[in-house]
Image (cartoon, grey):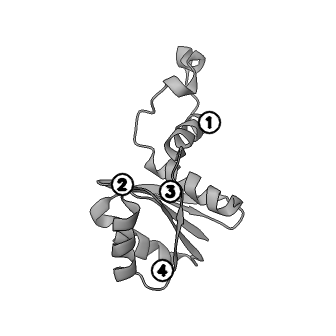
Amino acid sequence: MILAIDPGSEKCGVALLDENGILVSKQIVSRQNVITSIRSLITQYSIAHLIVGKGAFGQTLEKELTKNITTLDIIFIDEKNSTLEARKLYWQTNPPKGLWKFIPTSLRVPPMPIDDYAAQILGERYLKG
């Protein structure tokens, strides 16, 4: 299993994927609860790799992870365009209805945070490359 994290200042996207890239679960957790959530997932599943977005908040999270979770190595993945890809994935999973389906996805804004979709994108990137 791959545990991917899209770190942010207030919330983090967390996605769990199997070795074939199939999404097992995803969630958005507050920044203050991310370590607890990760620990919980590690005890529930056999996590092989911990993937973290290599952005501004990735280094901060790395310090917390190395201090609190020593059983897994941290692998950083470039976050470039992950939000745009997450938005596209959101609309593929939740197709718009009515007239909204005629609006290009690049102009639509999801009605909720998509950090969990961004984490899924990071996990898929790791598995592809």
Q: Earlier in the sequence, mark 2 or mark 1?
A: 2
Badge number at residue 26 = 3
Q: Is residue 23 visible?
A: no
Sequence-first disc among 1 and 3? 3
Q: Amino acid at mark 2?
A: Gly
Within 10 angstroms of label 2, few (less than 14), some, or many (20 or more) residues? some
Residue 109 visible (yes or no):
yes
**Residue type pointed to by label 4:** Thr
Quadrant in which residue 21 is drawn: bottom right
Query: Marks 4 and 2: CB-CB under 8 Å?
Result: no
Query: Which is nearer the eye, 4 or 63?
Result: 63
Instruction: First in sequence, mark 3 or 4: give its number.
Output: 3
Q: Which residue is mark 1?
A: 92
Q: Tell whether label 3 touches label 1 (CB within 8 Å).
A: no
Pointer 1: residues within 10 angstroms few (<14), some, or many (20+)? few
Is 91 on the left-hand or right-hand side of 30? right
Determine the residue positioned at 70% across, 59% down.
Answer: 128
Give amino acid for label 1.
Gln
Q: Quadrant of the N terminus?
A: bottom right
Q: Amino acid at mark 3?
A: Lys
Q: Which residue is mark 4?
A: 43
The dot on residue 8 is: 2
Please name which of the two marks, 1 or 4, marks the residue nearer to the observer: 1
Instruction: Determine the secondary structure under disc 1.
Output: helix
Residues at marks 2 and 1, CA–CA distance in whole angstroms: 24 Å
Q: How far apart in space, not on screen, are marks 1 and 4 (Cα)?
A: 31 Å
Mark 4 element type: helix
Q: Which mark is residue 12?
A: none
Quarter of the picture holding the C terminus: bottom right
